[in-house]
Image (tube, grey):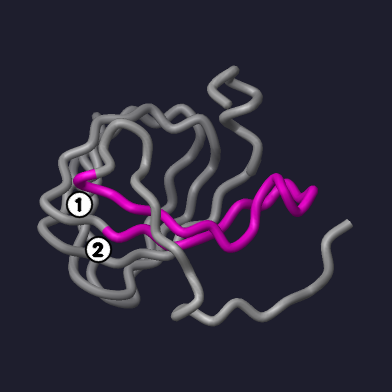
Amino acid sequence: MSQPRSIPFDSLTFVPRFAYGEMAQAAEVAGSVDDTELGAGFVRMSRADIPWQIKYDEVILVLEGEIEVVTEAGVLSAGPRDCLWLPKGTELRYRSDEALVFYAITPADWAAREGLS
Protein backbone atom coordinates (compact mmCIF):
# COMPACT_ATOMS: atom_id res chain seq x y z
CA MET A 1 0.00 0.00 0.00
CA SER A 2 1.33 3.43 -0.86
CA GLN A 3 1.75 6.20 1.69
CA PRO A 4 0.24 9.69 1.70
CA ARG A 5 2.61 12.16 0.07
CA SER A 6 3.05 15.70 -1.14
CA ILE A 7 3.84 16.12 -4.83
CA PRO A 8 5.36 19.51 -5.72
CA PHE A 9 4.41 20.58 -9.24
CA ASP A 10 8.05 21.46 -10.00
CA SER A 11 9.07 17.84 -9.29
CA LEU A 12 6.80 16.39 -12.01
CA THR A 13 8.15 14.95 -15.23
CA PHE A 14 5.86 15.37 -18.24
CA VAL A 15 6.07 12.57 -20.83
CA PRO A 16 4.44 12.25 -24.26
CA ARG A 17 0.97 10.70 -24.15
CA PHE A 18 0.40 7.73 -26.46
CA ALA A 19 0.43 8.50 -30.21
CA TYR A 20 -0.15 12.21 -29.62
CA GLY A 21 3.04 13.09 -27.78
CA GLU A 22 3.60 16.28 -29.75
CA MET A 23 0.13 17.47 -28.66
CA ALA A 24 -0.13 16.15 -25.10
CA GLN A 25 2.36 15.40 -22.34
CA ALA A 26 1.21 13.93 -19.01
CA ALA A 27 2.56 13.74 -15.47
CA GLU A 28 0.82 11.19 -13.25
CA VAL A 29 0.53 11.94 -9.54
CA ALA A 30 -1.51 8.88 -8.48
CA GLY A 31 -2.52 5.71 -10.23
CA SER A 32 -2.35 1.97 -10.48
CA VAL A 33 1.20 1.88 -9.03
CA ASP A 34 -0.42 3.18 -5.84
CA ASP A 35 -2.86 0.24 -5.78
CA THR A 36 -5.83 2.64 -6.05
CA GLU A 37 -8.83 2.89 -8.34
CA LEU A 38 -8.22 6.63 -8.69
CA GLY A 39 -5.79 7.98 -11.28
CA ALA A 40 -4.86 11.65 -11.32
CA GLY A 41 -2.31 13.98 -12.84
CA PHE A 42 -1.62 16.87 -15.14
CA VAL A 43 -1.65 17.19 -18.93
CA ARG A 44 -0.09 19.94 -21.03
CA MET A 45 -1.72 20.38 -24.42
CA SER A 46 -0.30 22.27 -27.36
CA ARG A 47 -2.03 22.56 -30.73
CA ALA A 48 -4.00 19.48 -29.72
CA ASP A 49 -6.71 17.72 -31.72
CA ILE A 50 -6.95 14.23 -30.25
CA PRO A 51 -9.71 11.76 -31.10
CA TRP A 52 -10.55 9.25 -28.35
CA GLN A 53 -13.23 7.07 -26.83
CA ILE A 54 -12.60 7.21 -23.11
CA LYS A 55 -12.36 3.92 -21.22
CA TYR A 56 -12.87 5.47 -17.75
CA ASP A 57 -14.89 8.14 -15.98
CA GLU A 58 -12.99 11.43 -16.10
CA VAL A 59 -13.09 14.86 -14.51
CA ILE A 60 -10.93 17.60 -16.03
CA LEU A 61 -10.09 20.86 -14.25
CA VAL A 62 -8.58 23.53 -16.48
CA LEU A 63 -5.75 25.41 -14.76
CA GLU A 64 -4.40 27.47 -17.67
CA GLY A 65 -5.60 28.13 -21.20
CA GLU A 66 -8.73 26.67 -22.72
CA ILE A 67 -9.90 23.25 -23.85
CA GLU A 68 -12.77 22.07 -26.00
CA VAL A 69 -14.16 18.56 -25.91
CA VAL A 70 -16.21 17.73 -28.97
CA THR A 71 -18.83 15.02 -28.39
CA GLU A 72 -21.89 13.78 -30.27
CA ALA A 73 -23.94 15.93 -27.89
CA GLY A 74 -22.02 19.10 -28.80
CA VAL A 75 -18.91 21.08 -27.88
CA LEU A 76 -17.96 21.49 -24.23
CA SER A 77 -15.69 24.48 -23.58
CA ALA A 78 -13.73 25.16 -20.41
CA GLY A 79 -11.26 27.81 -19.26
CA PRO A 80 -9.36 28.38 -16.01
CA ARG A 81 -11.13 26.94 -12.95
CA ASP A 82 -13.82 25.28 -15.13
CA CYS A 83 -14.45 21.54 -14.92
CA LEU A 84 -15.63 18.95 -17.41
CA TRP A 85 -17.30 15.62 -16.54
CA LEU A 86 -16.87 12.84 -19.12
CA PRO A 87 -18.47 9.44 -18.50
CA LYS A 88 -16.88 6.18 -19.62
CA GLY A 89 -17.57 5.34 -23.25
CA THR A 90 -17.81 8.94 -24.49
CA GLU A 91 -16.49 9.36 -28.03
CA LEU A 92 -14.77 12.73 -28.28
CA ARG A 93 -12.02 14.97 -29.55
CA TYR A 94 -9.87 16.91 -27.09
CA ARG A 95 -8.93 20.24 -28.70
CA SER A 96 -6.75 23.01 -27.36
CA ASP A 97 -4.30 25.62 -28.64
CA GLU A 98 -2.56 25.70 -25.24
CA ALA A 99 -3.73 24.38 -21.88
CA LEU A 100 -2.63 22.90 -18.58
CA VAL A 101 -5.27 20.66 -17.01
CA PHE A 102 -5.59 18.44 -13.97
CA TYR A 103 -7.45 15.17 -14.48
CA ALA A 104 -8.92 12.48 -12.26
CA ILE A 105 -9.99 9.12 -13.70
CA THR A 106 -11.35 5.82 -12.51
CA PRO A 107 -10.33 3.09 -12.92
CA ALA A 108 -6.66 4.03 -12.84
CA ASP A 109 -5.66 0.72 -14.46
CA TRP A 110 -7.92 1.15 -17.49
CA ALA A 111 -5.05 0.54 -19.95
CA ALA A 112 -4.19 -2.81 -18.38
CA ARG A 113 -7.86 -3.77 -18.41
CA GLU A 114 -7.96 -2.91 -22.12
CA GLY A 115 -4.76 -4.89 -22.80
CA LEU A 116 -2.82 -1.73 -23.70
CA SER A 117 -0.06 -1.90 -21.11
Furthest residue in direction top, as rendered: 115
Q: Which residues are magenta?
A: 22-44
Which quarter shows the C terminus?
top right
Nearer-the-camera pick, 22 or 112:
22
Taking 29 as reference, is 90 left or right?
left
| Amino acid type of the residue that numbered disc 1 sits on in the rendered structure | Glu
Identify the residue at image location x=43%, y=52%. Answer: 85
Number of marks drawn:
2
In front: 88, or 104? Answer: 104
| Residue at disc 2, secondary structure | strand
Q: Height in image: 87 above or below 11?
A: above
* Quarter of the rendering containing residue 32: top right
Q: Residue 7 appears at what percent x and percent y?
A: 60, 77
Estimate how packed mark 1 is, as few (under 14), some (14 to 19) or many (20 or more) residues with alpha carbons within 10 Å.
Answer: some
- Give x and y (percent) for residue 116: 54, 22
Q: Position of residue 107 (x, y in %)?
A: 65, 40
Residue 24 magenta-drawn? yes
On screen, 61 above or below 16?
A: below
Please, what secondary structure does the residue beneath circle 1 have?
strand
Identity, as a three-letter code, of the amino acid under mark 2: Ala
Picture disc at residue 68: 1
Left or right placement of residue 16 versus residue 107 in this view: left
- Residue 11: % across, % down: 50, 76
Q: Which residue lies under the disc numbered 2? A: 78
Look at the numbered discs 1 and 2 and tell me whether their residues touch, using CB distance below 8 Å: yes
Mark 2 Cα-neighbour bin, 10 Å: few <14, some 14–19, many ≥20: some
Q: Residue at x 46, y 59 (%)?
A: 27
Q: Is residue 17 above or below residue 29?
A: above
On the rendered image, what quadrant is the N terminus found in?
A: bottom right
Q: Residue at (64%, 59%) from the top-left corner?
A: 30
